[in-house]
């Protein structure tokens, strides 16, 4: 066909480029332009190519009979250097083009502050820009999921094989001796997503952390592997890094050997707006397709078997609400036709608050401050990474160890609080040990505190019927006194760790005197400085089949709908006592099996 109009010419040109791109293995099925897709009818349409969405896309297309389209609103991760070099995670997070740019509503628990919400706007979702910390949580966290959903399939023992399907344990970039730093029997080398110990370990700082665990074995025990299901104690950091590069769901589950499958298509710059063409089948609502927007034009992708929402804890409830699934009164008042009355949509959300004021100046130049302050050192490290993917840029610019600890159960009882943890082998708070003092001059270290089982609940709502308007997000931070209490109690416990004699000639002085603050002053400092660790989950939670609340059944099918599932961090009934990517990967691995079981 001749090129008779400029528009057609550019369409043909784009198509020619895409054809050429077929020669480059990892580009072939990742489309930028809807006009280049062979069609818009698939067996499965997956909304969101993040942590969960890419797992499901990969697993479903193992069956050559299933065709799958992934609609991803964001940009390509391909060649984005800040998403590849682990050390550049913070640089990437500072770039709004790769983010949804949401902010919370004012948080009363944070003295009215609004805080930025980081959500990746790129293929791989938050696994393309997160801090790569790999933590699973406690066995009891998952056993609690099984108990509240009535489905033993969500228990730790039953999920462990799914952790193993996800994880590809990998040697660290520096090939150091890893003896005594992890327990091989609780890891898998056969999965898809690379996990490794750090490729650079900050020897002086690390030695003090380990020595302090030897001095304080009762309160701060060393734990060989905090990912065994028994996380309590202090252990070496494990990260989703392989060969000195970030391993995201895009680089792993959509890697070259998978994306070349004929039945797998990914469309970028495609923002799902709502589910369309509803019909009633046997008392349930089925949707004929997913409406999406590309360059301001609306299209509909049809799913013959299932629509799977994997747009994350903010995106998924937004799409549901705009599709008429949510609280009837709210939707009707916005002029949205209510199709399924599910008041729990967007409710019961959890995120983990973090408090990072425990910092010390140290008598050592061996901290990250030196790298940020000295361009020569920075370029040396970057050069090393460029040459061999090793050196300190082969790790995230951050932690070396994590601790998972409990508070005295009696202190909860004395304050009439119910213990929020999943059980006696589960932590109340996490500590992140970072050899970085965020100092303009000199060197320092930070020990961040994270409330892992917050009791406060937040929400995602909408205040307009336009799906392209931002949703309204509330983390509900520190609304519940107990969350504040956990941080307040964790602070003295943390200070005690740094009283171990090993730190004596290393610590020069604390940046802030937390030790002598009154409870009231400490509370005020917490409310004025706490932030989000970006583990937002639970906005479309699983519940038992006959429960009076919840959004999905234990098989992840939406209550009252047919052919519509949610597979992402929205479905967590509780946030696990962990960073949330591993748990999300596992929900997706099992979720994909549940989908397959329905159709094979
Ligand atoms: C800054 C940051 C740091 C983090 N650090 C860690 C860490 O170190 N360790 C850890 O374990 N966890 C970490 N997390 C959390 C972890 O990355 C998330 O819990 C996990 O990625 C959630 O997976 P998901 O599939 O639910 O959502 P996401 O990974 O967010 O994927 C959702 C995808 O859907 C797309 N999408 C959304 N709406 C639409 C729409 N309407 N149409 C089409 N596409 C849409 C998004 O662009 C995105 O690609 C971090 C998160 C952030 C934000
Ligand atoms: C966030 O803001 C940046 C710059 O302002 C913009 O390029 C980007 O597209 C925005 N993200 C979304 C999802 O709109
Ligand atoms: C709900 O189902 C669970 C098992 O899934 C059962 O134990 C419980 O009794 C049921 N509750 C009601 C109210 O039917
Ligand atoms: C490693 O993990 C296995 C399985 O949980 C456990 O039996 C074993 O004791 C652990 N090894 C060590 C050295 O902790
Ligand atoms: C929130 O979850 C709890 C169980 O943890 C449940 O009792 C409650 O009904 C839920 N609320 C909503 C609005 O879903
Ligand atoms: C920066 O690092 C280089 C290389 O180690 C060193 O030679 C130089 O003295 C450092 N500069 C400063 C200001 O510390
Ligand atoms: C490393 O490689 C990048 C990209 O090729 C380049 O921009 C950068 O200047 C290099 N840096 C060093 C220090 O070699
Ligand atoms: C706990 O509850 C008891 C009984 O209701 C009450 O007497 C006590 O003051 C409460 N303690 C605190 C710390 O609120
Ligand atoms: C919705 O809320 C946002 C802020 O959260 C506000 O800017 C906007 O005006 C509101 N829109 C409507 C229609 O109320
Ligand atoms: C720093 O360490 C050096 C040598 O290890 C020691 O001489 C000096 O006193 C220390 N300084 C402080 C402030 O502790
Ligand atoms: C806290 O106060 C005590 C008593 O005045 C003092 O000895 C100690 O150095 C103070 N702690 C810090 C970190 O300044």
Image (tube, rainbow, N blue to C red):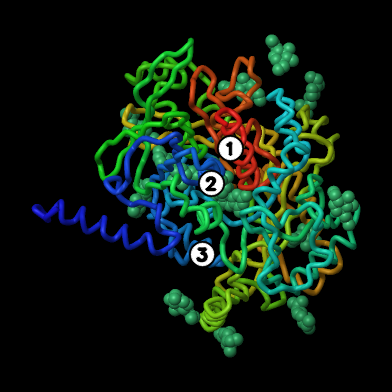
Seen as rendered, the residue at the extreme top is 283
Q: Earlier in the sequence, mark 1 or mark 2?
A: 2
Could you classify mark 3 by the number of other residues whose Cα lies within 10 Å: few (under 14), some (14-19), or many (20 or more)? many
Vertical side of 85 occupied by 128: above or below = above
Q: CA distance from mark 1 to mark 2?
A: 9 Å
Q: CA distance from mark 2 to mark 3?
A: 21 Å
Q: Earlier in the sequence, mark 2 or mark 3?
A: 2
Q: Earlier in the sequence, mark 1 or mark 3?
A: 3
- Residue 92, image x, y percentages: 47, 60
- Residue 404, image x, y percentages: 76, 49
- Residue 208, image x, y percentages: 80, 68
Q: Which residue is the site of mark 1?
A: 592
Q: Which residue is the site of mark 3?
A: 84
Vertical side of 211 occupied by 463: above or below = above
Question: Which quadrant of the structure image shows residue 217?
Answer: bottom right
Which is nearer the eye, 26 or 442? 26
Left or right: where 124 falls relative to 181? left
Left or right: where 215 falls relative to 592? right
Could you classify mark 2 by the number of other residues whose Cα lies within 10 Å: few (under 14), some (14-19), or many (20 or more)? many
Vertical side of 342 occupied by 216: above or below = below
Identify the residue at image location x=58%, y=69%. 439
């Amino acid at each position: 066909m001749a090129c008779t109009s400029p528009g057609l010419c550019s369409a043909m040109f784009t198509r020619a480029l895409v054809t050429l791109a077929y020669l480059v293995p990892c580009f072939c099925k990742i489309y930028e332009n809807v006009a280049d897709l062979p069609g818009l009818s698939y067996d499965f349409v997956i909304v969101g190519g993040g942590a969960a969405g890419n797992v499901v896309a990969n697993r479903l297309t193992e069956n050559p009979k299933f065709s799958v389209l992934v609609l991803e609103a964001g940009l390509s991760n391909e060649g984005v250097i800040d998403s590849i070099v682990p050390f550049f995670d913070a640089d990437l997070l500072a770039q709004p083009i790769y983010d949804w740019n949401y902010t919370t509503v004012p948080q009363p628990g944070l003295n009215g502050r609004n805080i930025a919400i980081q959500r990746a706007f790129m293929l791989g979702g938050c696994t393309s820009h997160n801090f790569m910390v790999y933590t699973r949580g406690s066995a009891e966290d998952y056993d609690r999921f099984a108990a509240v959903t009535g489905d033993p399939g969500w228990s730790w023992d039953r999920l462990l094989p799914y952790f193993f399907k996800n994880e590809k344990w990998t040697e660290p970039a520096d090939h150091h001796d890893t003896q005594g730093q992890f327990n091989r029997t609780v890891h898998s080398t056969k999965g898809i997503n690379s996990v490794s110990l750090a490729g650079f370990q900050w020897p002086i700082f690390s030695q003090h952390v380990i020595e302090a665990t030897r001095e304080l074995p009762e309160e701060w025990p060393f734990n060989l592997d905090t990912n065994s299901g028994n996380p309590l104690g202090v252990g070496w950091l494990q990260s989703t890094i392989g060969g000195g590069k970030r391993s995201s769901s895009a680089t792993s589950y959509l890697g070259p050997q998978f994306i070349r499958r004929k039945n797998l298509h990914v469309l970028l710059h495609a923002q799902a707006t709502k589910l369309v063409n509803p019909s009633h089948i046997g008392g349930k609502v089925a949707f004929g397709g997913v409406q999406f927007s590309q360059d301001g034009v609306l299209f509909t992708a049809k799913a013959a078997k299932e629509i799977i929402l994997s747009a994350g804890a903010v995106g998924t409830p937004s799409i549901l609400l705009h599709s008429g699934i949510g609280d009837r009164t709210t939707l009707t008042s916005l002029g949205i036709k209510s199709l399924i009355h599910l008041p729990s949509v967007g409710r019961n959300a959890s995120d983990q608050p973090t408090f990072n004021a425990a910092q010390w100046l140290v008598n050592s130049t061996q901290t990250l401050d030196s790298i940020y302050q000295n361009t020569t050192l920075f370029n040396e490290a970057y050069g090393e990474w460029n040459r061999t993917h090793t050196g300190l840029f082969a790790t995230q610019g951050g932690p070396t160890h994590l601790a998972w600890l409990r508070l005295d159960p009696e202190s909860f009882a004395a304050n009439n609080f119910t213990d929020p943890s999943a059980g006696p082998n589960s932590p109340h708070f996490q500590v992140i040990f970072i050899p970085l003092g965020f100092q303009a001059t000199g060197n320092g270290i930070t020990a961040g505190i994270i409330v892992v089982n917050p009791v406060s609940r937040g929400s995602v709502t909408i205040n307009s019927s336009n799906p392209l308007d931002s949703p309204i997000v509330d983390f509900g931070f520190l609304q519940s006194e107990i969350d504040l209490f956990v941080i307040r109690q964790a602070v003295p416990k943390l200070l005690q760790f740094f009283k171990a004699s090993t730190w004596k000639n290393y610590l020069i002085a604390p940046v802030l005197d937390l030790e002598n603050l009154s409870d009231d002053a400490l509370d005020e400092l917490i409310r004025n400085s706490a932030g989000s660790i970006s583990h937002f989950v639970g906005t479309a939670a699983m519940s038992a089949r006959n429960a009076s609340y919840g959004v999905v059944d234990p098989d992840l099918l939406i209550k009252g709908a047919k052919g519509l599932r949610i597979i992402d961090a929205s479905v967590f009934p509780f946030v696990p006592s962990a960073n949330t990517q591993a748990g999300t990967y596992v929900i997706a691995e099992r979720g994909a099996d549940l989908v397959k079981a329905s159709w094979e």
